[in-house]
Amino acid sequence: MSNDLPDDDMNLDPGFADRFERQFRPRCQLYLISPPAINDGFVDRLARALDAGPVAAFQLRLKDMDDHMIARAAEPLQRLCADADVTFIVNDSIALAKRLGADGVHLGQDDGDPREARALLGPAVQIGVTCHDSRHLAMDAGEAGADYVAFGSFYPTTTKETRHQPEPSILGWWSTLFELPCVAIGGITPANAAPLVAAGADFLAVCGAVWNAAEGEEAAVKAFAEVLAA
């Protein structure tokens, strides 16, 4: 990609560089995260969500369950994602991602080194890293071989404890300087998603806005699809 700008670029409006860069990146996509607990009916709910609109990835994030229980719960969900050509990502556990043959693993700052994950999982598996509001952590993750970095929480959320709240500008900073995709996460709804998309998010990671939506997961996914298509 050429980085040549017009000779009078000093007179350009401040947002020009971001818009110039964004036109060469794929459109922002939806990244679903499971609720912290699921039941047998969740397979049907996920199927409806995937049918409702474009979904790039699904992360299985189950708390207070051992790996054996998660593996049993994962089987039909992983098969569903494969049939829908949706990337299936395991949260936290490199070992579980290996056991399941998952498409990816998402690591928190205390869940292991991306280099370790790459060595165990191989070159094709997607590795994501939570970077909170830290540019330094994001650059470290990229240098360690991560396939994407995640920033958040951008908005208040009840899904997990919020200790970091970055400004949307961190998405623009990242997407302008680095090719590696960035994920925006935390309290994102169809009503507040647009500024994050405009700022430079490559993916919107959402949980409660879909699974807790009063109108149902299908309507929620369709609402996100409208925002992402705008």
Image (cartoon, helix red, strand yellow):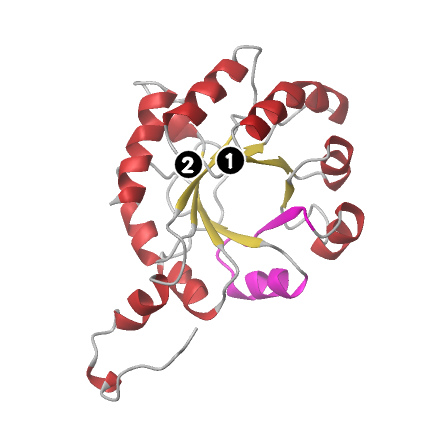
- Side of 199 relative to 30 (left or right): left
- Side of 23 relative to 35 (left or right): left
Disc 2 residue type (three-letter): Thr
Q: Disc 1 designates what residue?
A: 160
Where does residue 94 sit, x and y in percent of width and height? 73, 41
Q: How crowded is mark 1: few (under 14 residues within 10 Å), some or many (20 or more)?
A: few
The answer to whether residue 203 is visible is yes
**Secondary structure under badge 1?**
loop
Asked whether 141 or 176 is in front, the reply is 176
Outermost residue toward the top in this view: 40
| Residue at horizontal 41 percent and vertical 68 percent from the top | 176
Q: Disc 2 designates what residue?
A: 157
Q: In which quarter of the image is the C terminus?
A: top left
Where does residue 146 sit, x and y in percent of width and height? 63, 56
- Side of 142 relative to 226 (left or right): right
**Secondary structure under badge 2?**
loop
**Dot label at residue 102:** none
Disc 1 residue type (three-letter): Lys
The answer to whether residue 190 is visible is no
Q: Do the residues labelled 2 and 1 touch (CB within 8 Å)?
A: yes
Q: Is residue 172 above or below residue 203?
A: below
Question: Any magenta on residue 127?
Answer: yes
Q: Quadrant of the N terminus?
A: bottom left
Q: How crowded is mark 2: few (under 14 residues within 10 Å), some or many (20 or more)?
A: some
Magenta stretch in the rendered image: 124-144
Q: Is residue 62 above or below residue 26?
A: above
- Side of 65 relative to 39 (left or right): right
Tell me the distance, in whole angstroms, between the alpha carbons under discs 2 and 1: 7 Å
| Residue at horizontal 57 percent and vertical 13 percent from the top | 39
